Image: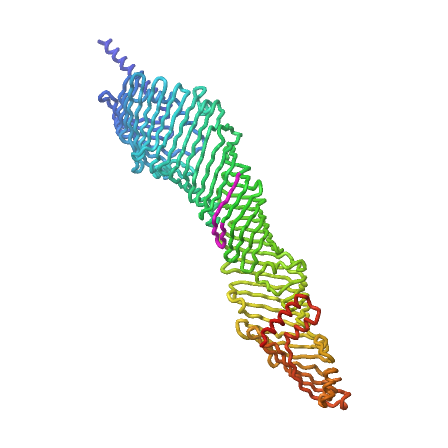
Amino acid sequence: MRRRVSILLLFVLVLTLAALLARHWGLQQLHATGVQQLDWQGVQWRGGAVVLDRLQLQMVDGLQLDVRQLRLQPGWRDGLRVRALQADSLGVNLPAGPESGESSGFDPLLLLGDEQFWRRLADWAPDEAAVGQIEASLPCRDQRCQLAGRWHLRRSAQGDDVTLSSTLLLNLDGQQLSLQPQLQLAAQRVRLTAPLQIDGAAAAQLHSEWQGGQHWQGRLQIPDWPQTPWLFGYLGRWLALGALPVEQIPAAAQLELDWQLDAARVPEALDDWLAGDVQLQGRLVLPEPWLVAQLGELSGELSLQVQGAAGDWRLRQAHLQALVQTPRVTALQTLPAALQPAQLTLQLTPLPDQRLLADAALQLDVQAGVTLPQGGELTLAGPVSVPLSRNWQLASDALLLRLQAPQLSLPQLRARDVTGRWTLRVQATADAVHSALTAPGSLAWQQLQLRDAQLTLRGARLEQPAFELTLPLNGDDTLSAAGRLTGKLDALEHAQLTPQRWDLRADWRWQQAALNWNGNLSNAAGLELAHQASWRSDGSWRLDGELTPLFMRAGNPLADSLTAWPELLSFASGQVGGTLSVSSGQSLRVRGDLTLTGLKGIYDRIAFSGLEGPLQLRLAAEQLTLEAPSLALAQANPGIELGPVRGQLSYHAALAQPAGGRLEVTELRTGLLGGEVRVLPTTLDLAQREQRAELQLQGLELGRLFEVYPTEGLSGGGTLDGRLPVLLRDGQLLIDDGAVAAREPGGVLRYRSDKLQRLAAANPSMRELAGVLEDFHYTVLSSQVDYGENGNMVLGLRLQGSNPDFQQGRQVNLNVTLEENIPALLASLQLSGKVSEIIQQRVQQHLIKQRAQQP
């Protein structure tokens, strides 16, 4: 009996020691797998299974697992296994780990391609497993986020073939996600099928197959992506989804990805798979627009086929076709609305069978297009080169850019039938696009209108020997471009310009939403204007020009260019230069300055020479101002010689009524007959029917008058002063009650005429008059002057004086009325003098017209 008790005690001791050793070994194994603490409650053996009311595990990384009502049924399958696992609930609490730049070394792609991993998983998997409720608390961007779901697994075997079927259901804020993977294992292969459903709709499916540990092929399909904007927003609580708005991937997106990998040896890293024989084929379709920030609504299709052998990779074929609607590229937002693209299209087709080397470049054919809001189109086509490096970039030396725009309506500018063609060198990176011409480009338009200036440029044919463009793709920088233009315009149309051909040369630059222009414009008549212009995208603009000096001896380009040029004004010599400044705003502003130097010519029937001085034109707030601050004329001859002339004049008028303004005469004087005629300062209101002024005569020499107006036998001398009140009525010159008188002490008049002597022989009174006038010394010579609408001047002449040789110098008073038609007199003086043939013709035409009008 004692022996039996001893044996029993020894057996209990051995069992206790084995239990202690097993527990110690188990704790060591758990600790090796990362379990820091293990607690359980309510362990029972019931129905052939171990039942635990609660099992708690805490891992060394802080992960906590809390399992309630866990049932583990052991069994034998090539060793001790868990035949069934069931739990009412599983709680998972994952703490936020410290941020670290170190990698864990875990490679999910390598694990996915490890055939032995799937075989071990199938070997250790229970025949059946289920978790009724999963509740997980995970760190996220909102500190803590909750995840709920349930899981079920079933294992079946038929001979050596094993099948694992699993279902994972997740409830994501009321939305349902279902993953149902099925793993099939045979002696020679392993297959995995994993369909994904979102809210009951098929979203994606994975097919994968492994053979011999070195062959892996598969397919990932998204046949028709459902509406899931919430999914990526939910995942975004945990994952950094990058710059692309994947949470907005549109419905109906399609993806097909096929791969076949044959490794040269059992892979230990992902590079072992890629170093073998590789075949990849993919296709992505976005039939509905995908809104991408800083780009726009993207849709299109991408397909590619890649093949590799022992690290030698080749791109067999590929194609990209993309459409961007309502583009939102920041650098394009500063362009005028008519130039902002309505949509962008892009086609990229690599040359077939290219080797993919790290230091090589991929050669592609590009077809790109920009559709403008008003129906215009900008296309870009040609070969490009893309280096296969980490930094994305693109380069080409032969891209052809074409522009075709039936119309372009910009602020204050409108163009029609615009075409262009440019061959470009392009370099593009993720930061910017740079472009320049490799050959002269061309630009043409049928019509271009500047509405504020009421100016039309018609029939342009321009060449561009230089062009550069920079388009930033990030940041706040905007599009900038520069170039040079040369060419011709069929006509530059304006109410004040004669239609004719113009030549244009210009350098231009677009920067900071503004166009700056520096050019030279010349026409067939010889008018040439060097100019600078600026135009902003808000429609404001400015033009500054300088007229190349015109030498009138070679011709008059102004007369051949300006419709308002006076028909009767012509120049024979001299020089004209000037500047022009025009700008837009609330109203058009114009400033023009002309400089006249030594001009000689003819106006109507007046020859002149030595015309000099500045002329200034101002237009602002619908008000027109013309000024001649220091006008000078050496000589003018309307039949009697005038000069020199000095003037300071200004004219102010409303643009709507340019002929009804005010003429301010600050100074206007001219030399005449050795003296001077001066207009007293005055203001003439041309909007009124009548205008008044007063002429002041000083120092006119009577002797010079007799030289200019020769009368047979009449001579004499003296100095005249006077005043002439002038009335302009409906453009007619009138003088009423003017007065002219000789200066003291008077002068001499001598009239010795055969006609007067014949009259004196027959008439005693005339004999006395003839005797007095043979040598009349006057002390008083005064006259009343009247000038009427018919051109007749009436002089009421009063003379006082004597002839020392007649009747002992007796005092004589004479009253004489003289009448002369001044236009006829001046015409006769011109015809009798040496005047040009043009003046003679105009004088004769005037006399003929005057005679025809007489009754």
Q: State whether residue 252 is above or below residue 669.
A: above
* Residue 85 belongs to the span the image colors magenta: no
Horizontal side of 803 relative to 123 (left or right) equals right
Q: Which residues are magenta?
A: 399-416
Q: State whether residue 542 is above or below residue 155.
A: below
> Quarter holding the C terminus?
bottom right
The part of the image, by quadrant, that contains residue 278 is: top left
Where residue 649 appears, as percent x and y from the top left, is 60, 69
* Residue 400 belongs to the span the image colors magenta: yes
User: Which is more toward the observer, 291 or 570?
Assistant: 570
User: Which is more toward the observer, 725 or 71?
Assistant: 725
Where residue 555 appears, as percent x and y from the top left, is 65, 59
Q: State whether residue 374 is above or below residue 37.
A: below
Q: Is residue 598 visible?
A: yes
Where residue 767 appears, as percent x and y from the top left, is 73, 88
> Quarter holding the N terminus?
top left
**Coloring basis for residues:** rainbow
Where residue 756 appears, as percent x and y from the top left, is 72, 84
Q: Is residue 776 visible?
A: no
User: Which is more toward the observer, 253 or 712?
Assistant: 712
Horizontal side of 166 relative to 545 (left or right) equals left
Tell me the residue at 48%/43% (across/down).
Answer: 378
- Give the overall secondary structure of the magenta segment: strand
Tally of numbered tags: 0
